[in-house]
């Protein structure tokens, strides 16, 4: 058996030698032990034959380079697979964050809660949210495109030339399709969210504009109402066409004449008043000066008749005005003999004398409407307060003629006081007293 094997080897070797001699080269083929590397010579005894052939060295270097290249490709593929997994995870978290945005907006809440790893919390403002989503989408698209380009440059172990230069191989189709699908889905979802946020921004703008319009309308109405009230209180048709209302018997409702009186030796005071208070209408007006709070007072207190006080001296007047209608009253006084006259509705109802004769009216005092003064300008007594309305309070430093008083009473003449005229700017009210427009002659005619 061994002889047969050696014979066959001899025949083959002989033919090979003759073939190589024909070409000018000679090769010797030997059996290789199992597990040995090809290209390495072994002797008949199984010992490795060291060869210094240049071709064999080049082949050996090529094989080693191929091994290193394959290992590098494996490491690169593993690294890229990890990057793809990381991007897929971030895409999933971004989608979850976008869904959370939609749910939160549907519930009418402006508070948005996101996880810690959503590549940055989305801003609350719709414009900032749109910008942030756009930047995120562009960043993800860029990273995915770079990944695909890098994958395209990976060398394949099956396409390496003998010189160690690698050829480009395309990314696996299933991986490329997956990346494109993810990118397309993300882009579609982000565009939808951007459209929703734009719509929400438009709705917020419209709601803000409507709210601003309602606010401006309410402010305009309020300003118009204030203007009307100012006109009714301060801008009467004429400066004298107003009244002072004192509806309650208290010690804090009153009016005050801003002007004071000069020293006088005679006076005439006229006014329109309307009251139904009982007992007594109270004090229509009082004038007090330092040292004498009752310098001039007109008062109806309790069941007593109306009284005129000059320097705290008293004269009872035959007047009756507590029937709830408008009445015109005038009182005249002169220091000579202390003579006085009382008129009601243009008719002289009483006269008298010896009322503080030869006493001059002192200047620099305070005129109060509706209260009697215990000290100058204050310390009022509620039981002596006037309850009702009064108007056209005028004062002169002389005694008017009866014809002038009749003209004032029947509205045929207008003659403002030369010392105290009845004008809006000259009267101020306190404690809840009010001023209102009044055309006395028309109102009196209506009462009649």
Image (tube, rainbow, N blue to C red):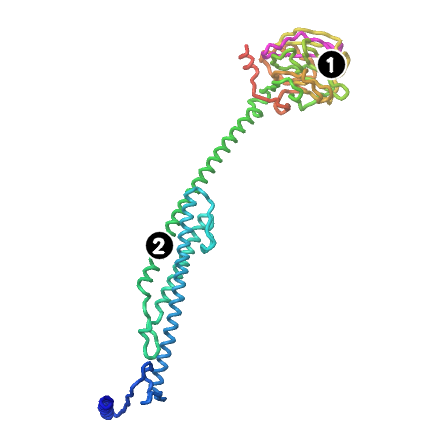
Viewer-side residue, 290 vs 13: 13
- Residue 328 vs residue 131, the one in the foreground: 131
Circle 1 — which element? strand
Q: Residue at x 45, y 54 (%)?
A: 118
Whether residue 386 is situated above or below residue 234 in the rendered picture: above
- Residue 156 x/y as whole percent: 33, 72
Task: Check disc 1: other Cα within 10 Å, few if <14, some if 14-19, many if 20+.
Answer: many
Judged from this view, the residue extending furthest toward the front is 1
Quarter of the image with the C terminus in it: top right
| Residue 331 is a magenta residue | yes
Which quarter shows the N terminus? bottom left
- Give the label, 1 or 2, closer to the camera: 2
What residue lies at 56% left-to-right and 23% top-to-bottom?
236
Circle on res. 185: 2
How crowded pointer 2 is (Cα within 10 Å; few <14, some 14-19, many 20+) is rated as some
Q: Is residue 306 left or right of residue 157?
A: right
Q: Position of residue 37 (x, y in %)?
A: 33, 82
Span colored in magenta: 312-339
Figure check: 340 above or below 148: above
Q: Quadrant of residue 264?
A: top right
Which is nearer the eye, 109 or 200? 109
Q: Position of residue 187 (x, y in %)?
A: 37, 54
**Residue for badge 1:** 310
The residue drawn where x is 60% and y is 19% is 245
Whether the magenta-drawn stretch holds residue 284 is answered as no
Secondary structure type for disc 2: helix
The front one of 434 and 342 is 434
Residue 284 quadrant = top right
């Amino acid at each position: 058996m061994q002889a047969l094997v050696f014979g066959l080897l001899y025949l083959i070797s002989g033919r090979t030698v003759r073939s190589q001699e024909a070409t000018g080269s000679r090769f010797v083929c030997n059996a290789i032990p199992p597990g040995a590397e090809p290209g390495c010579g072994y002797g008949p005894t199984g010992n490795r034959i060291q060869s210094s052939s240049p071709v064999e060295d080049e082949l050996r270097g090529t094989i080693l380079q191929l091994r290193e290249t394959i290992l590098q490709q494996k490491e690169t593929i593993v690294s890229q697979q990890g990057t793809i997994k990381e991007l897929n995870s971030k895409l999933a978290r971004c989608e979850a964050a976008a869904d959370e945005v939609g749910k939160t907006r549907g519930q009418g809440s402006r508070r948005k809660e996101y996880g810690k790893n959503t590549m940055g919390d989305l801003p609350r403002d719709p414009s900032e949210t749109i910008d942030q989503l756009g930047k995120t989408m562009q960043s993800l698209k860029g990273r995915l495109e770079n990944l695909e380009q890098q994958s395209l440059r990976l060398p394949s172990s099956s396409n390496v030339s003998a010189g160690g230069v690698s050829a480009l191989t395309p990314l696996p189709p299933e991986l490329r399709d997956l990346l494109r699908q993810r990118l397309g889905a993300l882009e579609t979802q982000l565009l939808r969210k951007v459209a929703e946020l734009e719509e929400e921004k438009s709705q917020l703008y419209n709601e803000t504009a409507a709210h601003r319009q309602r606010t401006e309308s309410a402010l305009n109405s309020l300003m118009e109402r204030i203007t009307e009230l100012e006109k009714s209180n301060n801008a009467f048709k004429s400066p004298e066409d107003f009244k002072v209302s004192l509806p309650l018997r208290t010690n804090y409702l009153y009016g005050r004449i801003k002007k004071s009186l000069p020293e006088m030796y005679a006076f005439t005071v006229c006014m329109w008043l309307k009251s139904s208070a009982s007992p007594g209408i109270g004090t229509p007006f009082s004038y007090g000066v330092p040292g004498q709070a009752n310098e001039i007072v007109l008062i109806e207190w309790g069941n007593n008749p109306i009284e005129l006080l000059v320097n705290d001296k008293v004269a009872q007047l035959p007047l009756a005005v507590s029937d709830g209608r408008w009445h015109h009253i005038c009182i005249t006084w002169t220091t000579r003999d202390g003579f006085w006259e009382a008129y009601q509705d243009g008719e002289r109802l009483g006269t008298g004398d010896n009322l503080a004769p030869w006493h001059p009216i002192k200047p620099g005092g305070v005129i109060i409407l509706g209260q009697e003064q215990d000290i100058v300008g204050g310390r009022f007594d509620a039981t002596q307060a006037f309850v009702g309305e009064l108007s056209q309070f005028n004062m002169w430093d002389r005694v008017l003629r009866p014809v002038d008083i009749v003209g004032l009473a029947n509205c045929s003449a207008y003659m403002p006081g030369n010392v105290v005229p009845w004008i809006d700017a000259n009267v101020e009210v306190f404690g809840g007293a009010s001023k209102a427009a009044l055309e006395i002659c028309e109102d009196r005619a209506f009462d009649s």
